[in-house]
Image (tube, grey):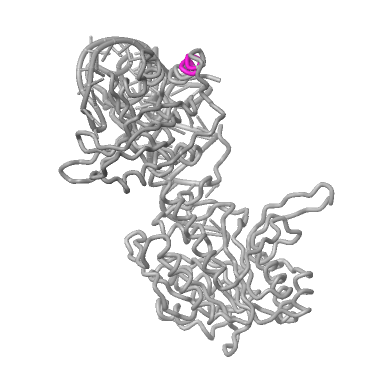
Amino acid sequence: MQLSEQEIVRRDALQKIRDLGINPYPAEQFNVTAFAQEIKENYNPDAEEEREVSMAGRVMIVRGKGKVSFAELQDSTGRIQLFVKRDNICPNEDKTLYDEVFKKLLDIGDFAGVKGEVFTTKTGEISVRVKEFVLLSKSLKPLPIVKTRVNEETGETEVYDAFTDPELRYRQRYVDLVVNPQVKEIFIKRSKVINSMRSYFDEQGWMEVETPILQPIHGGAAARPFQTHHNSLDMPLYLRIANELYLKRLIVGGFDGVYEFGKMFRNEGMDRTHNPEFTSMEIYVAYKDYIWMMKMVEECIERVAIAVTGGTKVMVGENEIDFKGPYRKLSMYDSIKEYTGIDVSKMDEDALRAVCKSLHIETDNSMGKGKLIDEIFGEKVEDHLIQPTYITDYPIEMTPLAKKHRTEEGLVERFELFVNGKEIANAYSELNDPIDQRERFEDQLKLAARGDDEAMALDEDFLRALEYGMPPTSGLGIGIDRLTMMLTNQSSIQEVLFFPQMKAEK
RNA sequence: CGGUGUGUAGCUCAGUUGGCAGGUAGCAUCCGACUUUUAAUCGGAGGGUCGUAGGUUCGAGUCCUACCACAUCGACCA
């Protein structure tokens, strides 16, 4: 391994620390009683006694190298300044800890534990007057040093030497998280998205479940799967592209409401909105329909938005989105009529193909009626749906798992929620008629025969479950990554995944 | 898969019509000074196979070709 100059320096320092009889990687726990952010928030300048604190983190900056130094310690909550005076940490004759360990052998990025009192310096910065200093873990690689300064004229924080190269940031996310606090914030918000949604569901009495990731038949969605092989069973298995069919089996089994947060895997293109593995939340509630589900989604999303951002209004790109319900509802046919002026509701396949041509939308022979309508919608309508909007009542051909519409011939009871021109939720009144479901699967097989390589496979065991009887049920899927992108105003999925998929490092 | 762009020190970046790679690089590093600093400062020093491999040329960071990685816009794809 080729070491850089700075890495050699740090390894030398490591050895010198050992030579001084100090363990650079001590085993004992270090008792932490305070955190940077909380210390600053709770500081009382009028208190009679200074607060004693014990804290730990990375040393990120050291200023001054005389007999007094100022350092910044970064813990999980932020940074706080340390006031390190030689005579404070070395009260006796032996000044080795300050002169050698602190001044010469300590590097940026090292973990240290400190004990001392909270006070304010002459310049007014809340700091810790260090009395005890202990090295907790030596860092052997130099971190990128990001410096910030508050511009006194504008009041804005200026960042110098930012660590911004996306490749380095994604490949070495641990470094990104250390030096870019705003990155950490995104992931904290992601966690809040999931937790607030989970607690909402739990309050309704629905149960979180887990279903197989390795599936013998990849059902529940239209997508190309990853295939693997089980050695002792000697059979192919697929990484799930959806968990829908398993969750419905659980409704058959008698649960009133089941939900799962989980990774899905699709062997398809990657771009700023697609990662090969992504997180979805699916929920199924018995005895409900898609109209009920719209209310539930509004309530849920509004609550998530408040939990994550503190309010219902969120800036997404240049648009201010208000997640407060109720949301606008528009049928798919009406939406196409509104944005193209064309009524496609009574058209057959040939007429639809002609419409596509007139709108300059490319088509091919594998596209059925449903797919053609979907193309028109995707090209002409989707981008206009900025504020949360339910698009309802989809053509039956596109949706083999949804129940036929209660009044409209040729449609199913389905809605998708669009925000800022992007779909973030998809829901149905679930198809529970086993004979109808079998016919729909068979229609999918016909589409597959026409060359639609993402048509759904027929799942006999799922049909058997439906034949035992499934109550009327409404189901919903939400793409957690995309919802998080919106609520954190990120345009790339890689910014909301800790470890986005990348090519192998060379 | 295609178009466009980027790749120079640990990090962030200059680098002209091809002429010794930055004594105008900054941070970081090393040596020294400094007992209230905050992008700390001051004095000195070191650090590079210019993404990789070829080619053109007396001479390539710079021009050409291929490849690799990333970004971006399309295609495909939820």
Q: Residue at x 42, y 60 (%)?
A: A308
Residue A348, x across and y down, in percent? 57, 82
Point out the image quarter for the C terminus of chain A.
top right
Q: Which residues are magenta?
A: A12-17
Q: Residue at x 41, y 50 (%)?
A: A185
Tell me if A437 is positioned left or right of A280 in this view.
right
Placement of A275 over or under A146, stated as above or below = below
Tell me if A231 is positioned left or right of A391 in this view.
right
**Is residue A470 in view?**
yes
Which of the pair A7/B47 is nearer the observer? A7
**Is residue A360 in view?**
no
Location of residue A57 by image quarter: top left
Residue A344, x across and y down, in percent? 50, 82
The main secondary structure of the magenta stretch is: helix
Q: Is residue A14 magenta?
A: yes
Placement of B43 over or under A472, stated as above or below = above
> Which residue is outermost to the front?
A48
Residue A11, x across and y down, in percent? 49, 18
Point out the image quarter for the N terminus of chain A.
top right
